[in-house]
Amino acid sequence: MAEEMRVLLEYADKINPESADEYVKVGGYAGLEKARKMVINDLIQEVKSSGLRGRGGAGFNAGMKWSFVPKNAEIKYVVCNLDEGEPGTYKDRIICEKNAQALLEGMAICGTAISSKQGYIYCRGEYPFTVKLLKNAIQSAKELGALGDFNIEVRMGAGAYVCGEETALIESIEGHRGEPRFKPPFPGVAGLWGVPTVVNNVETFACLPYILTNGSDWFAGIGAAKYPGTKIVTLTGDAVNTTFFEVPTDYILRDVIYKLGGGVKGGKKLKAVQVGGTSGSFIPEQNLDTQIDFDSMGAIGAALGSGAVLVLDETRDIVDIVTRISKFFEHESCGKCNPCREGTFRCREIMEKINSGKASQKDIDNLLLLTRVMQKAALCGLGQAAPFPIQSTIKHFAHEYARKIV
Ligand SMILES: Cc1cc2nc3c(=O)[nH]c(=O)nc-3n(C[C@H](O)[C@H](O)[C@H](O)COP(=O)(O)O)c2cc1C
């Protein structure tokens, strides 16, 4: 299998992403029209049956998430997570730049399913161009009457990685410091301004028009059975073609790198691949024949996350890279919970000691113990996932650590 499968990106660069008229000409807004004619329970069931799972990292069944929203609440919100703060990840920006109307349509379909009239797109502060594009796209959809009485506003973040976490994102929209909340209650029950709120990723929403138009069976039949559909992956680092691809979820990582990505630059050997962004695990060469679906990645101790694929060639210094990553997490920890605030600080401290050749095996043992505590005790996914790059490299690239310790 060497070809891409373009669903969300089928009309990329062929239509103006801001124009609702052009989108309608290629079949756009037919999914929303269909959704509006359905009984709400049937609509939620259709999304559940499609098997669509969140593309923001946690892989939760989208229809199931919607079904937890209390039916009797008077006000409810639909929130789109376009924070995309994970280094190496830019798939959500690409979806907006190539097919913004599908995102708006997907949010309106969700609004129909949970009876909400108001949606917010939370966009990372570093994407001013995308914000402008989205505002124009919303205006165009309004002028065409495509969204009916569903209203969408764009809110901008200020550059904090933690604001991608759904409850920190909600705090940020409310005008507070971006810090995660304790869960439960989950946003579906008490979210934005305390009312039921569905938070989904851009890619999750953008799949919905195609599910409604083509049917849940069609979607469920694409890619991996337990994580169906397509996935947009972004290839970065030492690959020849550092760009984005849309592939079915049973596509294997090796093909992303070698068939679509053209292999490693300069004919060098591959040393490692980090999947899922900065918080992802490092995967050695022997695990490249893994499907890029949520469960297959989990089975090799990795996480699909955002779908970012970072290629590292044989010359790269793994310990040095992980030291830099540990600085990133120390900087981005919001400080609300002790395990993450102190844990990311200590991880960075020990990684620097190892990297500068001053550490012993005892430091590595302490580091591993510390990361296990963080995973269990941190309040949110930031502190829980920060250990993955450290643990996976100590496991798969132990010799690189051994070379640096006294
Ligand atoms: C530190 C941190 C950063 C996150 N960043 C993002 C992000 O940029 N985009 C995103 O969709 N989800 C992000 N998430 C996951 C969200 O909390 C949430 O699970 C997701 O938006 C739900 O949407 P989905 O079910 O469609 O995947 C992040 C989680 C954590 C812990």
Image (tube, grey):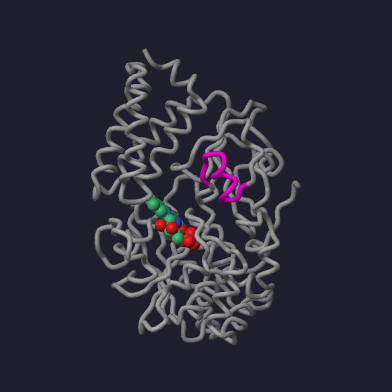
Is residue 300 shown left or right of residue 159? right
Is residue 312 shown left or right of residue 24? left
Q: Is residue 201 above or below residue 36?
A: above
Towards the viewer: 78 or 268: 78
The x, y position of residue 296, in whole percent, is 60, 46
The x, y position of residue 170, in whole percent, is 33, 65
Q: Is residue 277 visible?
A: yes
Residue at 39% x, 56% y: name it. 164
Provide the residue span drawn in magenta. 292-303
Towards the viewer: 304 or 72: 72
The x, y position of residue 386, in whole percent, is 38, 41
Is residue 123 shown left or right of residue 272? left
Residue 168 is covered by the magenta coloring = no
Q: Is residue 129 visible?
A: no
Residue at 66% x, 54% y: name it. 224
Q: Is residue 114 above or below residue 307?
A: below
Q: Quadrant of residue 314?
A: top right
Residue at 33% x, 75% y: name it. 195
